[in-house]
């Protein structure tokens, strides 16, 4: 027969209500009594019913992470995995569980169900899943949430954490300028997201009054990338390339190689996102490292503060780190 709260109370010599308050954390109990109750629970192998406790207290000790995945490839993304690991670890350190829900970019019904069904105490939401309707719903419900990534709308109203993409672009561009490349080309996928626009702003800040601005947008089209790049940029010799993703950097490097243009000599290259393969490229890529572990950790910290009703810094930026390797240098090779 399973142990009950009354059994624990009898062993410790307290009332069942005191045991209940310790289990649910609903009232302060002395450390000495709490320790005795915990020891008795262990001795009797007593495990509280999480669902019943949630029903009684209105607290689930669970936080939700909304992800926007249209296919399984996101799970092989090391950047995504590092953020999730950091979020889960930070929550576990505060005795919270993590529930992951796929929004799938179709609607916010999953999020509404979590909130209205009181299945979680707070949410971490990617900026791509946020819209005006959802913001208004969460604010009206006074429900704790934190956004990962600077939102495209009403950013001043909601708590969010993001990477300092603008500063990263400044540092990457300056690395190429310092190496002596007279023209710097920004090769981006688009300028539709906030982080893309921030990277564009950082690039423009760095080249201002120092060299001609040249921005080209691939729009995620990599077929016949070489012909497109030459058409947009012209002669690729003697230029530095700031690439807003590793994928763009890999394609740019391939085009330069096919044209006989030597990276770290005839052309320079810097990429955002320090994927593991970047340091093994030929030559190794100089990379603007985005600390997604710290991004996830900070999002979880902010959510814990929000759920506990504490004052917090509502908008936080995680600094990037420039990792200088051979691709951004300008090495004069003598025959």
Image (cartoon, grey):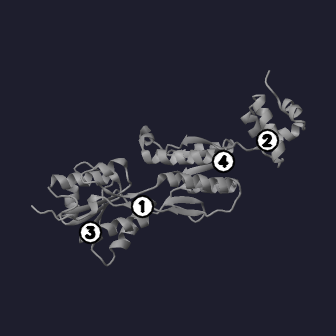
User: Which comes before the other along the chain, label 2 or label 1?
Assistant: 2
Q: Residue furthest top?
A: 1
Report crowding for label 3: few under 14, some 14 to 19, many 20 or more residues within 10 A (C-alpha).
Answer: some
Q: Look at the numbered disc 3 and give the secondary structure of its residue.
A: loop
Separation of marks 3 and 2 at Cα, in angstroms: 63 Å
Q: Is residue 107 left or right of residue 330?
A: right
Q: Is residue 180 above or below residue 72?
A: below
Circles 1, 4 touching at the beta carbon (< 8 Å): no
Circles 3, 4 touching at the beta carbon (< 8 Å): no
The residue identified by callout 2 is 35
Q: Is residue 205 left or right of residue 92?
A: left
Q: Is residue 216 left or right of residue 118?
A: left
Q: Is residue 301 above or below residue 21?
A: below
Q: Position of residue 2 (x, y in %)?
A: 79, 24
- Could you say which quadrant of the image residue 329 lies in? bottom left
Q: Residue furthest bottom?
A: 209
**In the image, what residue occupies the spot 46% across and 55% down?**
291
Q: Position of residue 104 (x, y in %)?
A: 49, 43
- Could you say which quadrant of the image residue 4 lies in? top right
- State the mark number for residue 321: 1
Report whether residue 137 is seen: no
**Label 2 vs label 1, nearer the camera:** 2
User: Which comes before the other along the chain, label 3 or label 1?
Assistant: 3
User: Which comes before the other along the chain, label 3 or label 4?
Assistant: 4
The residue identified by callout 4 is 94
Separation of marks 3 and 1 at Cα, in angstroms: 18 Å
Q: Position of residue 143 (x, y in %)?
A: 67, 52
User: Which comes before the other along the chain, label 4 or label 2?
Assistant: 2
- Could you say which quadrant of the image residue 96 lies in? top right
Report crowding for label 1: few under 14, some 14 to 19, many 20 or more residues within 10 A (C-alpha).
Answer: some
Out of 52 and 289, give the one closest to the viewer. 289
Q: Look at the numbered disc 1 and give the secondary structure of its residue.
A: strand
């Amino acid at each position: 027969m399973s142990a009950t709260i009354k059994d624990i109370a009898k062993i410790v010599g307290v009332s069942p209500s005191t045991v209940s308050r310790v289990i649910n954390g609903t009232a302060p109990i002395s450390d000495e009594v709490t320790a005795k109750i915990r020891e008795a629970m262990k001795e009797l192998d007593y495990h509280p019913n999480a669902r019943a406790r949630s029903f009684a207290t209105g607290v689930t000790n669970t936080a939700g992470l909304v992800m926007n995945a249209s296919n399984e490839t996101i799970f092989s993304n090391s950047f995504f995995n590092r953020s999730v690991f950091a979020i889960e670890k930070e929550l576990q350190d505060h005795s919270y569980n993590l529930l992951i829900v796929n929004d799938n970019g179709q609607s916010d019904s999953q999020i509404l169900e979590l909130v209205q069904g009181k299945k979680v105490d707070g949410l971490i939401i990617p900026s791509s899943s946020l819209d005006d309707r959802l913001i208004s719903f969460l604010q009206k419900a006074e429900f704790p949430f934190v956004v990962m990534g600077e939102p495209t709308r009403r950013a001043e109203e909601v708590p969010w954490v993001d990477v300092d993409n603008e500063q990263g672009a400044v540092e990457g561009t300056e690395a190429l300028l310092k190496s002596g490349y007279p023209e710097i080309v920004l090769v981006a996928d688009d300028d539709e997201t906030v982080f893309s626009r921030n990277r564009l702003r950082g690039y423009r800040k760095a080249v201002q009054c120092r060299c001609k601005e040249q921005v080209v947008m691939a729009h995620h089209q990599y077929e016949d990338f070489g012909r497109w790049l030459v058409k947009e940029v012209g002669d690729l010799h003697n230029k530095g390339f700031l690439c807003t993703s590793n994928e763009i950097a890999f394609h740019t490097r391939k085009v330069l190689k096919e044209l006989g243009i030597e990276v770290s000599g005839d052309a320079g290259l810097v990429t955002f996102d320090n994927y593991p393969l970047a340091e093994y490229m030929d030559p190794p890529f100089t990379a603007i490292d985005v600390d997604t572990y710290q991004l996830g950790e900070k999002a979880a910290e902010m959510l814990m503060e929000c759920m506990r009703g504490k004052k917090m810094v509502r908008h936080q930026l995680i600094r990037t780190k420039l990792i200088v390797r051979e691709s951004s240098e300008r090495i004069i090779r003598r025959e």
